[in-house]
Image (spheres, rainbow, N blue to C red):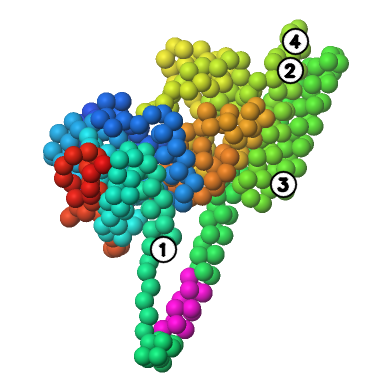
Amino acid sequence: MKRLLLLLAACAAVVPVPAARAGPIVDKAVAALQSSPVYVDPGADLAISSADQNRVRQKIDSAGAGPVYIAILPAGAELEAGGSPDGVLQALHDALARKGTYAAVIGRHFRAGSDVLAKGAAGRLATEALDAHRGQGVTATLLDFIDRVATERSGGTSGGGGDGNGDGSPGAGGSSLIVLLVAGGLIFLVFRGVRRRRQNQAELAEVRAAAHDDLIALADDVQKLEQPVESNPQAKAQYTQALDSYEKATGSYDRATQPRQLEAVTTALEEGRYHMTAAEAVLAGHQPPERRAPCFFDPRHGPSTRDVEWAPPGGTARKVPACEADAQAVERGAEPASREVMAGGRMVPYWSAPPYFGPWAGGYFMPFGGAGFLSGLFVGELLGGAYGGFGYGSWGGAGTPGGFGSWDSGGGGGGDFGGGMSFGGGDFGGGGGGGGDF
């Protein structure tokens, strides 16, 4: 509580007046971006299809572009933000309050800004992407923009130069510069390696904690059947298989040294859950249930009973497997309580966790259709991590304020938001914008 009060006091000192809500279009976009890196308003002038939205999400998760947020909005959003597309991008950033690279198509205007790239870099990349895909549409431009952001973050756009003594060979100053560059490069590689190892350890710890909770949950539930199954050989057989699956999951858990190795844990746990459910059915005088995918909302609920139409906040509706209780909740218009995991210091629904949770979550569902099945279920970052693409998350771990305009938490350097805006971009279709026309 003391820490919370200190944080609140610090926030109050930085932002004396709470930010006003922009308007219904921008507010809806912000709400959707909380759980998905891509939002398309149905009324947007240049709305893209659901399939193209998934392509953009997957590109964000796999390209290594870091936290990226993309919104495609109708021109009316400008009226909620001072009458300019730049104002809309600023409003999206201020309301979402997460570090990252932001890109927005407002009406026919394309704008981008970032606080994880150098000042003006995102706008320049947006202009370049727009120029490169003139006439090819929004999706092609956004995909190229994400690739350019990834390249910029990796330092791939930096140029080179040289200094010589007139005959093409380096002079004394040039030799010293080469030595310094090599030494600096080695130091950077060592530092990056240490940082990456620490990040890997932190990610593994988070996923192992989720897997450990799953192991305990199955152990507790199976233990309750120990006495009841003794008088029923068929139930006892299912119970024994559940125990075998639990032991297999425990062994995989103990051997895991990377998040991707925890897929074997949840695959075994899914099998154990099914056999436990089958044992319960036999004890109740019923036949073992059909072997179906686990309940999407919480795989610990065991096998699903049917599929229901469900949409994440601000996202596209999709068919997901659900246990009977959650299926009825969805049909009543309620939102079932989803399994949550600790990711980056905050609890999030497991289906919107960062990509390194992908193998753990995918293990539950991979036996029921592989990547094609998973791509129809997961949203946000987990979609990329569930079947490859274990890169930096698109939006999960980036939810800490700092470096943006009025709520900068200290430290200088870069950033397009607040102060003088430098968003760049251009317009789709006729007229103006400085970035070129399609």
Q: Residue at x 48, y 70 (%)?
A: 188
Which of labels 3 and 1 is toward the front?
1
Q: Main secondary structure of the magenta part?
A: helix
Q: Secondary structure at mark 3?
A: helix
The amino acid beneath tag 3 is: Asp
- Image quadrant holding the N terminus, namely top left
Residue 227 position in % (x across, y down)? 80, 20
Circle 2 residues within 10 Å: few <14, some 14–19, many ≥20: many
Q: Which mark is residue 254?
A: 3
The amino acid beneath tag 4 is: Gln
Specify whether 170 is left or right of 361.
left
Q: Is residue 142 magenta?
A: no
Residue 233 visible in image: yes
Q: Magenta residues?
A: 177-188
Q: Is residue 183 magenta?
A: yes
The amino acid beneath tag 2 is: Ala
Q: Secondary structure at mark 4?
A: loop
Q: Which residue is mark 2?
A: 278
Specify whether 258 is left or right of 229.
left
Which of labels 1 and 4 is toward the front?
1
Front residue of this view, candidates 333 and 436: 436
Which of labels 1 and 2 is toward the front?
1
Q: Which residue is mark 1?
A: 155
The amino acid beneath tag 1 is: Gly
Mark positioned earlier in the residue sequence (3 or 4) = 3
Residue 335 position in % (x across, y down)? 44, 21
Q: Residue at x 18, y 31 (%)?
A: 76
Residue 135 position in % (x across, y down)? 30, 40
